[in-house]
Image (cartoon, helix red, strand yellow):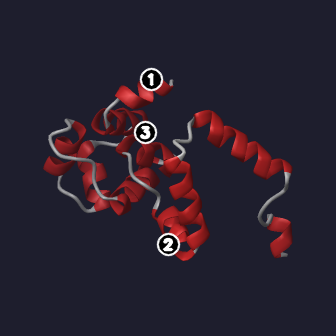
Amino acid sequence: MIDQLMTETFGKKLRDLRIQAEVGLRELARLIEKSPGYISDVEQDHVPPPSEDVILKIAAVLNVAKKELLTAARKMDPEISSYVAREPEAADFLRMAQEKKFERKDWDMLTKLAQAAKLGKTDKDDQ
């Protein structure tokens, strides 16, 4: 699965998801306010993946998780970018992780540690 994710192009992923959602190319183009030719060019990998905002519109139209398309495009969720920009410690932590060359197993361990330590707020905390 990971190998497939790394070799499958954004265009192929988009086309497969669009067909699976039974959304025509022209219909998708109309709903996201882009030309059918542009969507075709994206699906055929003739142009780079669209902007994050356009990808979010596509995900909504196709009713797929935004993470799936953003990951395929190797782009970051604008909500995450905004969070990192607001929280300097998050940026510092990511910089450190990059310097130490964190791997998938490191991120998995950190996720488990954060969950076990009950770090951050839960929905109950906000009530």
Write the residue at 22% across / 58% down: 34
In this orientation, which residue lies closer to the viewer: 35 or 67?
67
Mark 2 or mark 3, earlier in chain: 3
Q: Mark 2 vs mark 1: give the one in front.
A: 2
- Percent x, y for residue 94? 54, 56
Q: Left or right: 22 with respect to 89?
A: left
- Dot 1: what SS? helix
Report crowding for label 3: few under 14, some 14 to 19, many 20 or more residues within 10 A (C-alpha). Answer: few
Mark 1–mark 3 Cα distance, whole angstroms, equals 24 Å
Q: Give the residue type that dot 3 points to.
A: Ala
Vertical position of residue 70 compared to residue 52: above or below: above
Mark 2 or mark 1, earlier in chain: 1
Residue to which mark 2 is pinned = 85
Q: Mark 1 vs mark 3: give the one in front.
A: 1
Q: Give the residue type that dot 1 points to.
A: Asp
Q: Left or right: 2 with respect to 89?
A: left
- Percent x, y for residue 127? 85, 75
Q: Which mark is residue 21?
A: 3
Mark 1 or mark 3, earlier in chain: 1
Q: Give the residue type that dot 2 points to.
A: Ala
Q: Quadrant of residue 71?
A: top left
Residue to which mark 1 is pinned = 3
- Dot 2: what SS? helix
Q: Mark 2 vs mark 3: give the one in front.
A: 2
- Dot 3: what SS? loop
Write the residue at 51% across / 57% down: 95
Mark 2–mark 3 Cα distance, whole angstroms, equals 34 Å
Q: Left or right: 69 with respect to 25?
A: right
